[in-house]
Amino acid sequence: MDIQRTNWALIGLLWTTGLLAAAQFAKLTLTLDGFQAAYQNQPAPLAVSAVSVVGILGGAVAGFFVAKIGARRSVLWAVAMSAVVSLIQGRAMPFEWFMATRIIEGFGHLLLVVALPTMMVALAKPNDKTVVMGIWGTFFGVGYAVLALVVPVIAEWGGHWAVFRAHGILLALMFPVVWVVLPKVMTAGAAMPNIVSLHRTIYTNPRYFAPGLGHGIYTSIFIALVAFLPSTLGAAWLTAVLPLANLSGTFAAGFVAKWVPASKLSIYGFVSGIILFTLLALTGSIAVALIALFMTGLTAGANFAAVPELNSAPEDQARSNGAMAQIGNIGTFSGTPIYALVAGNLWGIAGVSVVICVAGAVFAGLAYRAARMSAV
């Protein structure tokens, strides 16, 4: 698709659809207390992570699947499926059934986070593509920040189940809009690869998996801290501010990476996290918490920027982005249940964060070092 002029209006619509994809996690993270009360003696935090199951299993092949059915069709199917599932979730049901709906919702989420940026890049002229990807990288943080303001109002008015219904209604309203305006930016029909061979190729080459490893370690921190840190610090308003602090770091990474290689910047962010989360345990300072979220956001942006740094060919970037989706979902899945074990305990939350940042500095650091040595 030869684009001579960037379609900013349509890109903005796609980004807005991305906010609804972020809401698939945020709607439950931000109503976790009410959800836990409804399902006493059940592992409620696992419901946050359940959306990630599909990404864990199919993240590496998601890009090929979108190419097979087409980006437009992927978005339409994902929006429709997510709307139906969210409306179903708006009614009380047995916990096992609710977990099943979350796993089904994972299919829609994975399609959205792969197809939306694919369409956004296709709608941009060459000089704007990096800017567009920078815009896309903000969808999760902005989505959380917006919902942190809106969810309490909806929950107070209609209870936590109303939040799920509202999400479904917004998706249902979005469907006819995207049906009318979305163009075809990818021809459907691409062949699916051999799944075993694809995984072997990705995970034996550090240029492909190093950014994903850094991203997966990061994602195990972000959602969990937004869920548990505000109440632990006795500052509910942090629920809206923490995502913004994280988002600021992600924005800053794009500029800092002009002078510092992204593959190194990611590790500097983890090292800073070790220091800052240790200080948080000692001081309980809200300012330190905000700086820590900023630095982890810096790591997030650096991991995305490291993909083209280490892989110049589009097909290599596709493999690396597959690993980003897959390992990132592993981090998202594991983070909330781990932090739930120490919820309300500042030393526990900060301690887990320090351990995760140490793992990021060591393991992602080694992977990035090997990737730089093998980069061509």
Image (tube, rainbow, N blue to C red):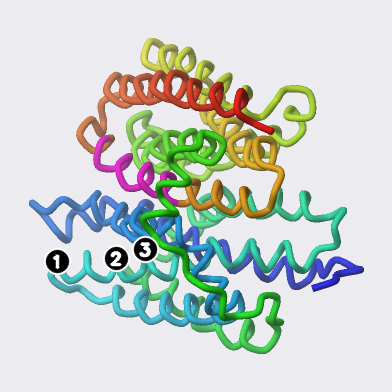
Asked whether, in this view, residue 97 is left or right of residue 127, the answer is: left
The type of residue carrying mark 3 is Ala
Quick one: label 1 or label 3, which is nearer the N terminus?
Answer: 1
Whether residue 66 appears in this view of the structure is yes
The residue mark sitting in front, 1 or 2, is 2
Label 3: few (<14), some (14–19) or many (≥20) C-alpha neighbours in 10 Å: some
Residue that mark 3 sits on: 155
- Which residue is rendered at x = 53% and y = 71% of the image? 66
335 is within the stretch colored magenta: yes
Closest to the observer: 123 or 26?
123
**Distance between the Cα atoms at labels 3 and 2?**
23 Å
Give the image quarter of residue 297: top right
Quick one: label 3 or label 2, which is nearer the N terminus?
Answer: 2
Q: Where 193 sits versus 77, above or below?
A: above
* x and y, in percent, of residue 194 in the image: 41, 62
Asked whether, in this view, residue 211 is left or right of residue 248, the answer is: left
Quarter occupied by the C terminus: top right
Q: Are marks 1 and 2 in contact (CB under 8 Å)?
A: no
Residue that mark 1 sits on: 96
**Distance between the Cα atoms at labels 1 and 2?**
11 Å
The residue mark sitting in front, 3 or 2, is 2
Magenta residues span 326-338
- Which residue is rendered at x = 61% and y = 48% of the image? 316
- SS at mark 1 in the image: helix
Asked whether, in this view, residue 181 is left or right of residue 103, the answer is: right
The type of residue carrying mark 1 is Glu
Closest to the observer: 272 or 161?
272
**Distance between the Cα atoms at labels 1 and 3?**
23 Å
Give the image quarter of residue 1: bottom right
The type of residue carrying mark 2 is Ile
Residue that mark 2 sits on: 103
